[in-house]
């Protein structure tokens, strides 16, 4: 491959000229658009720029979860459309203190908590 700036000979896979450092644009084989050297897909038509690849353009589809809005969709909601609560994934750890269930089965939940809380600190 010859550099269009200094006419130096470069390897066919070169992204920059070895003599002058000019970035070689990558022409799309499908539409001819000149893409930056690091591009993997054409900025004009979406075709793969990888040599020997004839893949179709990739269509970006936002991920959804059972019809629930994605983060990007939630950001575009008007203030009056924002839900009051939000579903989140959490991890819960339950640890049993030996004999605690028998001790607390007849107690009020607040009394049971007062007994167990000091053990967690």
Image (spheres, rainbow, N blue to C red):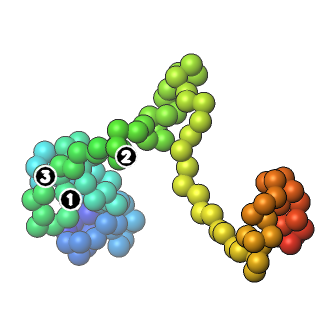
Please, what secondary structure does the residue beneath circle 3 have?
Answer: loop
Q: Does the image show residue 33?
A: no
Q: How far across and down, in percent of the image, does residue 95 sit?
A: 70, 73
Q: Does the image show residue 67?
A: yes
The answer to which image quadrant residue 66 occupies is top left
Q: Is residue 72 left or right of residue 28?
A: right
Q: How far across and down, in percent of the image, does residue 60 sit?
A: 28, 45
Q: Is residue 7 left or right of residue 76?
A: left
Compared with residue 8, is residue 74 higher up or lower down, i.e. above or below? above
Near mark 2 (Cα within 10 A), the count class, few <14, some 14-19 or many ≥20, is few
Determine which of the numbered discs, if any, sits on residue 56 in the image: 3
Please name which of the two marks, 1 or 2, marks the residue nearer to the observer. 2
Q: Is residue 71 left or right of residue 26?
A: right
Please, what secondary structure does the residue beneath circle 1 have?
Answer: loop
Q: Is residue 9 left or right of residue 107?
A: left
The residue drawn where x is 52% and y is 22% is 81
The residue drawn where x is 79% and y is 65% is 104
Front residue of 88 and 43: 88
Front residue of 83 and 78: 83
The residue drawn where x is 56% and y is 40% is 86
Residue marked by disc 1: 49
Check the picture and name the quadrant holding the C terminus: bottom right
Q: Earlier in the sequence, mark 2 or mark 3?
A: 3
Q: Earlier in the sequence, mark 3 or mark 1?
A: 1
Residue marked by disc 2: 65
Please, what secondary structure does the residue beneath circle 2 have?
Answer: loop
Please name which of the two marks, 2 or 3, marks the residue nearer to the observer. 2
Q: How far across and down, in percent of the image, does residue 44 sit?
A: 23, 42
Q: Earlier in the sequence, mark 1 or mark 2?
A: 1
Cα distance between the residues tagged 3 and 1:
11 Å
Numbered marks: total = 3
Near mark 3 (Cα within 10 A), the count class, few <14, some 14-19 or many ≥20, is few
């Amino acid at each position: 491959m010859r550099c269009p700036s200094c006419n130096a000979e470069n390897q066919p896979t070169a992204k920059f000229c070895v003599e002058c450092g000019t970035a070689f644009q990558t022409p799309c084989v499908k539409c001819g658009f000149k893409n930056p050297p690091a591009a993997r897909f054409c900025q004009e038509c979406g075709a793969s720029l990888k040599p020997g690849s004839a893949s179709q353009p990739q269509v970006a589809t936002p991920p959804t979860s059972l019809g629930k809005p994605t983060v990007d969709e939630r950001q575009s909601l008007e203030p009056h459309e924002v839900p009051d609560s939000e579903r989140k994934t959490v991890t819960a750890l339950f640890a049993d203190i030996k004999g605690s269930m028998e001790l607390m089965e007849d107690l009020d939940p607040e009394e049971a908590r007062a007994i167990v809380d000091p053990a967690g600190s």
